[in-house]
Image (cartoon, helix red, strand yellow):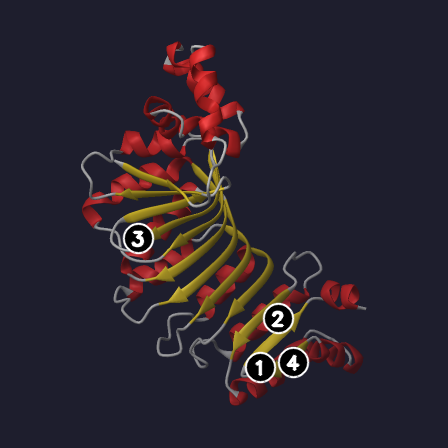
């Protein structure tokens, strides 16, 4: 039910066989073998698992893996690469791949990156939820189609925070309202990037402000509709970035030159209305710049760090 192969030659596998006989390792119950497996480093664990079919079976159920990357790819496939250069493929359409199998395989495991690319049959999404429920991951790379919207919505409900979230909008995405709801429901993030929505006015004031509030480092809205975010919304984003109690360092947001002029005028007007003098207004404008079709806003902390 799980396809596994080694991506690099393992020269020491044959050295394990004598040990299996001399120490009667195969006579140990599965619970003891599992404990032995999880205590080994990834390379030694691979050596041991490849030495005998029964040990491979124990290994697949043991969990406690460190993956460099886990991919939800193609048609209902999960692909994983671990730190011992082993490759795993799990077909969610396979009746032998059950939620219990996936929970055992991924239990107490972590991945530096989770990638969502492709589609998952709605009938087997419950299996995917079982796999991801026990997997801890750092960064999240999403090629956003209707299937990915559902997956990311489910992840957002079960996670307190994400690391870096990188979303690539796909042209075949049809459920725009569900995509909006998913973006609004994202948990706290370290960094956020979204690309490729120039033809859709989905990323508006509400979504940009929601994401900036939840992001601790930087937020980047690239190739988005240049008129979906208003000058008023951009001023509110600036006030968040400039706020000394806010942790976010910078925001990049695509905007037309007309929108940039409207933003700077409204920013100066808003600051003047609040009692700011000319020097303060000038410094505020210095913390924003416009290039390559985007407005860039930097916090005072970012400026101090760069100096």
303 w.r.t. 124: above or below: below
Inter-mark Cα distance, 2 to 4: 12 Å
Total marks shown come to: 4
Circle number at residue 289: 4
Mark 1: few/some/many CA within 10 Å (<14, 14-19, 20+): many
Q: Image check: 119 left or right of 82? A: left
Callout 2 secondary element: helix
The quadrant of the picture occupied by the N terminus is top left
Q: Earlier in the sequence, mark 4 or mark 3?
A: 3
| Residue under numbered circle 1 | 263
Viewer-nearest residue: 247 or 94: 94
Give the left or right position of residue 287, taking residue 209 as reference. right
Q: Is residue 128 visible?
A: yes
Depth check, front residue: 207 or 290: 290
Q: Earlier in the sequence, mark 2 or mark 4?
A: 2
Instruction: Measure how far apart labels 4 and 3 are at the Cα level.
Output: 36 Å
Callout 4: helix, strand or loop? strand
Q: Depth-wise, is mark 1 or mark 4 nearer the camera?
A: 4
- For disc 3, the marked residue is 150
Q: What's the distance in space between the residues labelled 1 and 4, CA to CA?
A: 11 Å
The residue located at (53%, 68%) in the rendering is 220
Q: Residues within 10 Å of mark 4 (few under 14, many from 20)?
A: some
Residue under circle 2? 238
């Amino acid at each position: 039910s799980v396809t596994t192969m080694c991506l690099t030659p393992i020269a020491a596998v044959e050295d394990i066989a004598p040990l299996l006989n001399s120490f009667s390792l195969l006579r140990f119950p599965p619970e003891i073998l599992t404990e032995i497996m999880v205590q080994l480093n990834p390379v030694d664990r691979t050596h041991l698992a490849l030495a005998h079919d029964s040990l491979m079976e124990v290994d697949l159920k043991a969990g406690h893996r460190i993956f460099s990357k886990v991919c939800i790819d193609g048609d209902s496939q999960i692909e994983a690469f671990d730190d011992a250069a082993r490759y795993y493929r799990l077909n969610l359409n396979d009746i032998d791949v059950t939620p219990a199998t996936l929970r055992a395989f991924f239990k107490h495991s972590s991945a530096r990156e989770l990638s969502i690319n492709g589609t998952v049959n709605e009938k087997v999404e419950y299996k995917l939820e079982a796999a991801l429920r026990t997997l801890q991951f750092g960064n999240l790379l999403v090629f956003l189609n209707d299937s990915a919207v559902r997956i990311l919505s489910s992840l957002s409900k079960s996670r307190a925070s994400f690391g870096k979230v990188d979303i690539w909008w796909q042209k075949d995405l049809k459920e725009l309202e569900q995509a909006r709801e998913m973006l609004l429901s994202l948990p706290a993030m370290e960094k956020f990037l979204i690309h490729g929505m120039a033809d859709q006015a989905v990323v508006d004031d509400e979504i940009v402000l929601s994401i900036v509030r939840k992001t601790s480092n930087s937020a980047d809205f690239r190739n988005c509709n240049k008129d979906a975010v208003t000058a008023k919304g951009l001023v509110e984003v600036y006030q968040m970035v400039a706020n000394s109690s806010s942790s976010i360092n910078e925001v990049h947001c695509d905007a037309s030159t007309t929108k940039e002029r409207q933003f700077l005028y409204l920013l100066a007007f808003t600051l003047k209305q609040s009692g700011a003098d000319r020097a303060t207004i000038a410094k505020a404008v210095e913390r924003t710049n416009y290039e390559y079709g985007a407005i860039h806003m930097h916090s005072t902390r970012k400026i101090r760090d760069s100096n």
